[in-house]
Image (cartoon, rainbow, N blue to C red):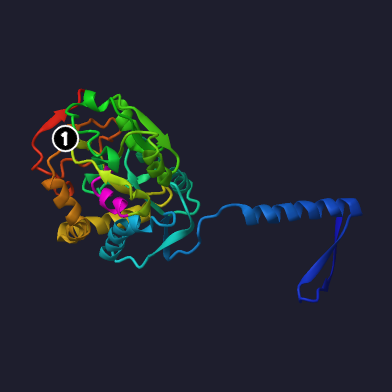
Amino acid sequence: MRAALPTEPCRAGIERIHIDMPLPLQQTVWRWLLCLLLCGLLLPVHASDATAIYYPRWSDGDESRSNYMLAQLRLALDKAGSPLRLVPTHTSMEQERALVDLQHDKHLDVVWSMTSHEREERLLPVRIPLDKGLFGWRVALLPRERVDLLKHVRTLDDLRQFTAGQGHDWPDTAILQSQGLPVVVSSNYASLFHMLQARRFDYFPRSVLEIGTELQNPRAQQLVADPHVLLHYPTALYFFFSPRRPELAETVRIGMERAVADGSFEQLFKQQFAHSLAHLQDAERQVIELPNPLLPSATPLQRRELWFSPTQLRQTQVAPK
């Protein structure tokens, strides 16, 4: 095989090199080149816009669930002096898909999620709880006609008589199961509301920061918040970043620390959740404490300014470890 040195111009002004080879071999080479080109076009690649931070889009109708997290992320970037823009992915992503995508640095730059040993091994957390720990304070969603289902629940043993619904990849699922609580899971968040109404399970534990917004959604028209029981386990909702982007994680960490120090983090938190906190504190519910076997030892529980504690809720039932 020999490449001829002379070249001739193409109509587009690009020179074409003639290669002397048998026709069948030329056809094979062109097939391979076409295959490589198509593979290059189809392979997922990380967004190349260096001015943007890509985050996972929620499914239609649930976009407002990300408003607070995005506001805190924007605040952190502003405090760190970063000009980066926040851009959603083109399509929606369920939680585990987003975490895997982030781990492999494909399309995403940031995901917010409850922490666990496994997630902190795979990803870079910024250990400032966006929720101030309130994702671990849970009130059950119930069908309206079963509002008193948990009225006589006083202990963990009482609660074991009922089945909870959860996402299949949520840390909450493992936390509940570790205490012997029956759980039915789904891979789709929205379907859990329909499953509850169809009595595929008895109750759907939701964070006190989520339940108010969720009850306003049309799919929850026949649902109510349980007035009798409050579950609690220590946990934290963090921003997570790819191990390949430590500089981005550090930028957000610096910005969040500055926002905590000057009070703007707390101000934003109260603006978003004042109504939810008042409702939590005013309610008289039986509190059932659950240990969290997934909580990493690096969780900054000693930093009291990062956590919310509803001290009005005195009576508790502690689950055995």
Q: Nearer the viewer, residue 102 or 13?
A: 102
Q: Residue furthest front?
A: 145
Q: Residue 85 magenta-drawn?
A: no
- In the figure, residue 52 lies in which quadrant? bottom left
Q: Is residue 152 above or below residue 249?
A: above
Q: Nearer the viewer, residue 53 or 284?
A: 284
* Image location of residue 108, percent across then percent down: 45, 54
The quadrant of the picture occupied by the C terminus is: top left
* Image location of residue 214, percent across then percent down: 31, 51
Q: Mark 1: few, some, or many residues within 10 Å (few <14, many ≥20)?
A: many
Total count of labels: 1
The answer to whether one can see residue 228 in this image is: yes
Q: Residue sitting at 38 percent across and 44 percent down?
A: 193
Residue type at tag 1: Val
* Image location of residue 16, percent across then percent down: 80, 68
The answer to whether one can see residue 130 in this image is: no
Question: Could you tell me which secondary element the residue under label 1 belongs to?
Answer: strand
Position of 101 with respect to 24 (left or right) is left
Q: Is residue 134 above or below residue 57?
A: above
* Image location of residue 191, percent across then percent down: 43, 43
Q: Which residues are magenta?
A: 206-216
Position of 216 with respect to 94 (left or right) is left
Residue that numbered label 1 is attached to: 287
Q: Nearer the viewer, residue 212 or 174?
A: 212
Q: Residue sitting at 45 percent across and 40 percent down?
A: 187
- In the figure, residue 319 lies in which quadrant? top left
